[in-house]
Image (cartoon, rainbow, N blue to C red):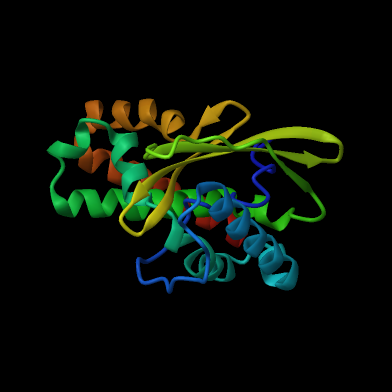
Amino acid sequence: MKKFFLIPLFAALFSFASAGASAQTVDSSSPDTLVKTVTQQVVDAIHADKSIQQGDITHITRLVNEKILPYTDFRRTTQLAMGRNWRTATPEQQDAVVEQFKMLLIRTYSGALAQVRDQQIQYKPFRMNPDDTDTVVRSVVMNNGSPIELDYRLYKTPNGWRVYDINVLGAWLIQAYQQQFNEQIQQKGVDGLIQFLTQRNQQLAAGKQS
């Protein structure tokens, strides 16, 4: 957990619930503007909700649905984490992995959201060519004087830019899960990965209830 407290603003970035989130009035035509605006909305919402500060999963899920989900592509995140195994999975298996992976991340990072206080966010100069369709917005979170690298990878869609990966202290989320996913699938197939994620979610849920 050492390096995950730092995701104090977009920690739940990939921890969504359903796809029925209502879009907010955020300009998604510019990657850096999108990240800055959504991040500030998330921080403001956390400060205003004591239940989120206490790690309430229901409130965190609602926050993610309303403020984050409309500007992310978690299905793309899951697809890249699974690599070529995604193509061999059935549509039902794909949906199951997406849902269990979402829940795993929301349970893993819910504690980080509770620690959001007065961290300062510094965005690095953003440069992008007009014809770029994939880019990275880089930032540094100052937590008790310690700089924490936190970057966002986005790609351009017909509906604007969408976040699909985050980098914490040099470790990209997708890359961090690729090996684990591949090992589970090699050993027990896609159903084995689904079972692994499901069991892990049950363990985390049980832990939070104690």
Residue drawn at x 37%, y 29% as measured from the top left = 178
Confirm whether residue 198 shows in the render.
Answer: no
Which of these two is toward me, 135 or 185?
A: 135
Residue 134 % position (x, y) = 40, 37
Quadrant where the C terminus sits is bottom right
Q: Is residue 34 above or below residue 191?
A: below
Front residue (pair 63, 70) = 70
The answer to whether residue 115 shows anywhere in this view is yes
Q: Position of residue 148 (x, y in %)?
A: 71, 34
Give me the residue at 53% from left, 56% from top. Answer: 206
Is residue 184 found left or right of 23 in the rendered image? left
For image coordinates 57% across by 47% down, the residue present is 32
Q: Residue at x 37, y 47 (%)?
A: 156
Between residue 67 and residue 182, name the one nearer to us: 67
Q: Is residue 19 above or below residue 12?
A: below
| Among the 4 quarters of the image, the one containing residue 150 | top right
Q: Quadrant where the N terminus lies?
A: top right
- Point out residue 158 in the picture as x, y percentages from the top left corner: 30, 56
Left or right of 191? Residue 53 is: right
